[in-house]
Amino acid sequence: MTIEDVCADLDIARSTFYDWRTKRKAPPCLKLPNGDLRIRRSDYEEWLATLYLDVV
């Protein structure tokens, strides 16, 4: 998934995602050779599940 995909799914600004990344609160990212970031869907779904467990 791209950063844009994640931001659209969560309805957040790109800057919010990067703030979370700086604070190590974002899902794990892979850095591609061209410098772009990607997030594995499985990592994203696991990350979402941990957020839900923290709220419950």
Image (spheres, grey):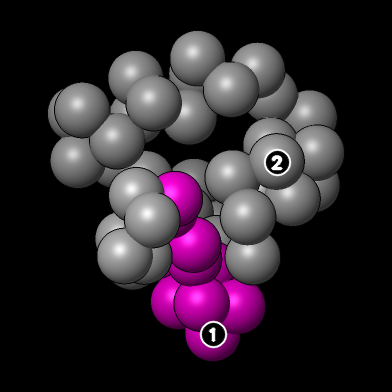
Relative to 42, is 30 above or below? Answer: above
Tell me what residue is drawn at x 65 percent, y 17 percent: 13
**Residue where numbered disc 2 is placed:** 4
- In this orientation, does residue 8 appear? yes
Answer whether residue 2 is magenta in the image: no
Tell me what residue is drawn at x 19 percent, y 40 percent: 24
Could you tell me residue 51's position as x and y percent? 47, 54
Tell me what residue is drawn at x 21 percent, y 28 percent: 22
Q: Residues within 10 Å of mark 1 (few under 14, many from 20)?
A: few
Q: Is residue 23 left or right of residue 31?
A: left
Kind of residue sitting beneath label 2: Glu
Asked whether disc 1 touches disc 2, contact meaning CB atoms under 8 Å apart, the reply is: no
Q: Give the quadrant of residue 34.
A: bottom left
Could you tell me residue 30's position as x and y percent? 33, 66
Pair 1/2: label in front: 2
Q: Residues within 10 Å of mark 2 (few under 14, many from 20)?
A: some
Could you tell me residue 21's position as x and y percent? 29, 36
Tell me what residue is drawn at x 34 percent, y 49 percent: 35
Q: Is residue 2 left or right of residue 26?
A: right
Residues in magenta?
36-47
Where is the N terminus found, in terms of image quarters?
bottom right
Kind of residue sitting beneath label 1: Ser
